Structures are given as structure tokens and as C-alpha cells.
Amino acid sequence: MIKFILGRLSYLIPTFIGITIVAFGFVRILPGDPVLLMAGERGMTPEHYQDMMARLGFDRPIWEQYLEYLWKLLHGDFGNSIVTKQPVLSDFLTLFPATLELAFCAIVIAVVIGVPIGVLAALKRGSWFDQVTMTSALVGYSMPIFWWGLLLIIFFSGVLGWTPVSGRVSLLYYFPTPTGFMLIDSLMSGQKGAFASAASHLILPSIVLATIPLAVIARQTRSAMLEVLSEDYVRTARAKGLTPRRVVGVHALRNAMIPVITTIGLQVGVLMAGAILTETIFSWPGIGKWMVDSISRRDYPVVQSGLLLIAGIVMVVNLVVDLLYGLINPRIRHS
Amino acid sequence: MKLRTSLLAASAMMAMVAGGASAKTLIYCSEGSPEGFDPAPYTSGTTFDAAARTVYSRLVEFSPGTTSIVPGLAESWTISEDGLEYTFKLRAGVKFQTTDYFTPTRDLNADDVIFSFDRQGNADNPFNQYVAGISYEYYTSMGLDTMIKSMEKVDDLTVKFTLNAPNAPFLADLGMDFASIVSKEYADKLMADGKGADFNNQPIGTGPFVFVAYQKDAVIRYKANPDYFGTKPMIDDLVFAITTDAAVRAQKLKAGECHVMPYPAPADIEALKSDPNLTVMEQAGLNVAYLAYNTLEKPFDDARVRKALNMAIDKQAIIDAVFQGTGMVAKNPIPPTMWGYNDAIMDDAYDPAAAKQMLADAGVSDLHMNIWAMPVQRPYMPNARRTAELMQADLAQIGVTAEIVSYEWGEYLKKSTELDRDGAVILGWTGDNGDPDNFLNVLLSCQAAGEGGANRSHWCNEEFSDLLAKAALSSDIAERTRLYEQAQVIFKDQAPWLTIDHSTVFMPMSTKVTGYVMNPLGTHAFDMVDITE
């Protein structure tokens, strides 16, 4: 097992270096730069432009900038935003709990609803339930997130008035947020109604963010389940006279879960991408919105280090999934 | 309805927390996150609203709803005969804000004023680079770096600025956000503690609101400044709820989650107007959108060609289609709400037949040109691509084929200043300080016509530029008005631009909000606002 873990870890180093190059290069390949955007309609003389670029250190050869970036990274320095002048790491740590809280709720919704739907659809293959849920899953998967989010806001917040429009908690509550997780902080605040307010603010964004993973998980569970149900050991289990519940719940589902867990792991990357749009619509102060703002301002240090941190998290999650996979599937562990 | 009830309950609770039965909280759905809380290094209105208009005040202020200059921290001032010396008498007893991170030991004095400008203009000032790489864009671009010769503390409450040459817009410049007065005592303390960067995170000023907390990208909280030297704000707490999407802002306003929102999407305005719980204030924006020809390139170096093209474009159709009928056709490069506007000028009438003839007279046939359409929405131009398409269709009527080009915004801004730019560029301007010089000189003078300058028609008319220079030297408004009016006649005659529109700015708010005054300079201030329950 240790060899397996070390093997997986050794993949991380080249991947990590690759990401630094992509993250560093990506934002610089985009046309435009922070100084031009700062000058706006007013324009800037070529001399002043050069001076500003020099002040920010962007006038030096690109490889020199990259090596300096790498050197600082090795020393734990993720750089400072050129706009807000704040350290990128501290901004990331401030904003990440918001994204994590949202992503966690979304994945819980996706799993809790997606897996049973997939199982039921597989068991009732070809039935109207199967048809309706799988068609809905396809629709959910193809849904433009921005449009979907706005639609839910207009209907549930605007027309029905059931849910708040955006934000993390009603602004009339004001309490310290030591953990950054609003559900926890609102509970700790002891203010009456704060937790309910935080929870109600999570409903719509979680549903929106969960939509695509839910569709994927439901479809994946269904096909994995169908495959397993036709295996010999399931037939044997049935022949033995086990109850259908036991056959499905113990023998089939456990084996069907192996590919589903991988899928769930892969959805973390999807959640990060989805967070960009979801956070923008719901004014959710997380890292997705932060990245969008920083890209549009061409805030190079934030974009390059932010991407690296996000990629790092996705990598770690995938590693955990890999290990988990090894744990539940001995064939992988021993190969 | 349930939600509103819970909001009310929460509000009542907040009132108890605040210790008073009638704490009034105004929630403003702001359009973005501030870049920082020191207004000097930044250029965006979002930052100015969050920092300059709340926490800080300036030597002079723009009277609410106008662009006229009124006393601020300076209770009076004198300008020497030669226009070189500005002596400001400061108000006595003005207190910097007391917060949990700073308690001032003295009142505002001349040292603070000198420090506020010196730190921006003097690279040797120890606070100039209080965080590495910081620059003071407005100080430089408004020309204060070359304008100010010296600053002198005459006594504790008197400060004298000496200029290198007379400059009438100087006074208006001092009312701008970057010229906010900061506390030297606070800066010194932060430096001594090695925490200079906090200056940009935890502001201390003399303005109507005290900074309480900023939760990044989510909420900014302020409370009324009990020591404010002006009329005390009527609300107790001011909250900025950062909401970047315009459609979501509108929904929040409708749902009662905020009281005021800026920048509604044009498509939402009708629905907001029809909501009985909301009012939509509107005001002519202090802005202009234009199509700038490259007057260095043939055949656009010929004023007759430019004028012919101007006559071929139906500007009213653009207002109707792109601005949904709001806004007005522009005939001058400055908006009509600004002093110095020459209303006697007749716009070039929309007349395709005459335009065609004029082109033929100028010896131009089979003209192909590019129209640059910017990729972003700006307050003066919600949809440049659509505008360009309408122009394209109009020009086709007189036999001119136009191709629409666009670039990424930063590239667009840069490439559009290049001297050999191929084509006419759609762009615009929003006033900084209400002075005509801030439009005419910045956008059309010879001085701004070089590469990188804001004069994107590269039009350099000596007579026009001389009039502007003369106007800048005079501090007599009547005299300046006369000179600017003359300059506008030359502009119209030479037609370096097609002046497109002056847009209308909308400000939807709850009917509970009273006393809100729209600011023609586009900033948002809440010191005079009240809220009824």
C-alpha cells in the first residue's frame, strides 16, 4: 500500500511543475495587460507605460519572471495582487471556505439524489421513471449554468419569495466569521435566525452547482448498476434466494460504486469550474468569483497563483480518490 | 413575504444590538469589490464610492448634484492675482475618525493636507511606496505632478499651494477622489509599527462614515461618523452588498434585500420603473460617446470627408435602438449639463443625399473604412457592436463600405491610440471633475494627440488648442465659457469626431429611501440619505 501511495505521489511533482508553466503562461497569453486596463480611456504615453510595467516587474524577460515566481513559490511566497496589493495566499484562504461550503453542499445534493435515482433507473430499466430521469439528467448536464441560476432566482426569489436572491447571509446579521464557513459561524454567533438565514442562502446556489454533477452521477450509477446486475455473482446471489434488497444493496451496489466514486472525484474539478459561474450569479464571495475578477483585471500574480492553488486542491482530491479506489478495489492496489 | 418578515425581525434585532431602538441601516447593492481603501492609487468609480465618498473628505467638494465647487475641509481659499498661489484656510476642530485600530491625538491640520499630496507626487516621501509597486495614476494624469511647484504650511490651519503656471481646473482637481485628505499621524504610526500596508485596508479619514469591516468580495460595513464636521448622516449604518451581476442586483432590490442599486441593465429599467415599491431616478450623464476618425490618414484628413460621414449617420436611430430611447444625441464634445456648453451650435443634419454629394465633391469614391467597436459596455455606450452595425448600414447608403473590427479591451485601448490606426474608433468619456478642460483638453488637444494619448482622432488644431490653453490660464468663468464656446465652433467645423450621445444614468431605489441626490460625476454618496420604515 505504501508503495502504491508513493507511486501516486510521484506523479504529482511533474504535474505540479506543468501547472505552474500553464498558469504562468495562460494569463500572459491573453491580450491586454493590467497597466492598459488601469489607464482606461485616458490612455498613457509610451514612456509612462514602460515605467508602470517596470514598477510591476513585467518589463523583464519572461523566463526571468517565471524563475523568480518558481523560486518564491518554493519559499512559500505566492506573490501579492497588483491591484489590491494583498498577499494571494491570504486572499485565497479567506475566500476558499465559501467555495468549499458551497461545493460540499452541492456534492452532497448530487450524491444523495443522484445515486438513488441511478439505482432505481437501473432496476426499472426502460420504465417511465428511467426515461424521465435519464432525459432530465441529460437536460441538466447540458444546462447553461448562468441562465439556470438566473431562472431559479427569478422564480423562487422573485416570484415566490421563498429564498434570498444572493449573498451568504442576511446583511442585517453581523457577526465574526472565524472559520469562514457561514453555517458554522452563524451557529457560533448565537444570533437567533442567523443559521436559518445562512442555510436559506445556500439552497439555490447549491442546487445550481449540483445540477451537472447530479446528472453525471445519476447516469454513471445507472450504467454501472446495469453492468453489475448482469454479472454472474448477482445471478448466483438471486439463485441462492437472497432477498432482492440484499442482492441490490450489498452485492450489486457495492461493486457498482467503484466507478461511481471515481466519477464523484472527477466532479470536484467540475465543481471548481461551475463555481466560477455560480459564484458570479449569486454574489458568492468564493475563489471562482475572485478568479474571474482577477482575470478581467489581468492581475497576473493572483491568476497564476490562484490557478495553482485550485489545481493543487483538485490534484489532492484526485489523489484521495485514487487511494480510496485502491482501498475498495484490491486489483488496483496490487497491480 | 416570509423573507421580508425575517429581515424585519433581524433588523429589529440589529437595532437592539446597536443599542438604540431606531438604528437605520441602508443597504447599497454595489457593482463590484473595491481595489483598496486608499483612493489615491486607484482609478475606478467602484473604489471611489467605497473609500473616497464614505470615509474621506477633501479640501473642496462638489456641491451635491452639481459640479460646482464648495468648501470642504477648507472653509475658504484665496487665489493670487497671477493665479499661481492658492491659499486654503482649513476648518478648525476637524477630527479624524476613531476606530478600534486608531485613535487620533490631534485634529486635522496643514501637515495632513501637505502629506496627502506629497506622498503621491514625491518619490522620496517615505510613504510614497508604502506597498511596493504602488503608483498614483490620477495624480499624474491630472498633471498635478508638473503643476504643483511647492506646498507650504503657513500655520496649522493654513496651507499654500504654489503652481508652476496658472491652471484654472486645479481647484476642481482638488475635489476629486484621489485628492482625499488622509491622516499623517495615522500613516506615521503604521510606518513605525511596520504595518504600512494596513493604510489600504483600514482607512482613517474625516468623512461622514467610519469604516467598520470589509469581508472580501461580499460586504463592506460602515457606521455614521459621530465626529463628522458636516451635517451628520441620518442613517446609522451603511452596508455595501457587493453584487456584480446587474440582473441579480435588480432582483435583490425588488426582493427588498437592498435599498439602492447602481447601473441597472437597460433591459431591466422598464420593469423596475413599474414596481410600486421602487423609484428610478435618472439624470443626464456627464459623458459623451464618439466615433473618432484618424485625421492623419487619407481621406479622413479632409474635414469635408469627416463631415460627410457624420451627415450620413442617423444618430437618433442609434439612441432608439441601442439606448432604448434614453439618452440624447450629442452635438458637442461636452455634455449639456456642463458649463461652457455651446448650445448655439447646429448639429450636422442627417442627410444621406447631401453627404453623398459632399463626398463626391471631396473627390472620394468607393471608400472602404473600418469601424472599431469596443468589446465592453461603458456608461456612455451599452452596445458598441450594435452601434457600429447601425453606422455600417447608414454608410452603405452613401456607398461607403465599412467593416467592423474589435479587440480585447486592453488591446483596444492601446491600439486605438496608435498613429497609423486603420479606421474610426468608437469610444467615450465620463467627466472627472466637471470642468470642460477635462473633456476638451484631455480628448482633443494637440498635447493629447500623440501615441498613447487620449486624443484618438490625432487631430491637432493649433487654434483650438490655443483657446483651451488660454482658458486654462484664466480663473474667470465667464471668460473661460466664451473661450470654450469658440473652441466648440472649431470642433464642429473640423469634425474630428462624430459625437454620438450623452447617455442617461439610472439609479433605482426603494421608495423608503429619501434624500438621495444623483451626482453628475457618477459617484455614489449616502451622507444625505434617510430611510423611512
Image (cartoon, coloured by chain):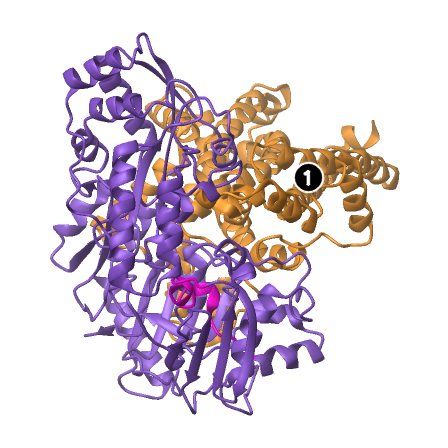
Chain colours: A orange, B purple
| Nearer to us in this view, A250 or A309 | A309
Residue located 18% across and 37% down the image: B324
Side of A308 relative to A238 (left or right): right
Q: Find disc 1 in the rendering and name its residue.
A: A321
What amino acid does circle 1 point to? Val
Q: Quadrant of residue A202?
A: bottom left
Residue found at the far top of this picture:
B366
Q: Position of residue A256 (x, y in %)?
A: 59, 30
Residue B265 visible in the shown view: no
Residue located 23% across and 63% down the image: B2
Q: Is residue B76 above or below residue B326?
A: below
Range of residues picked out in magenta: B166-183
Is disc 1 placed on a helix, strand or loop? Answer: helix
Residue found at the far right of this picture:
A3
| Nearer to us in this view, A193 or B225 | B225
Q: Position of residue B40 (x, y in %)?
A: 52, 63
Most common SS among magenta residues: loop
Q: Position of residue B427 (x, y in %)?
A: 37, 37
Q: Reply yes or no: does residue B480 show up in magenta.
A: no
The quarter in which the N terminus of chain B is drawn is bottom left
Q: Is residue A231 above or below residue B399?
A: below
Q: Reply yes or no: does residue B173 show up in magenta.
A: yes
How many marks are shown on the rendered structure?
Answer: 1
Q: Quadrant of residue A163?
A: bottom left
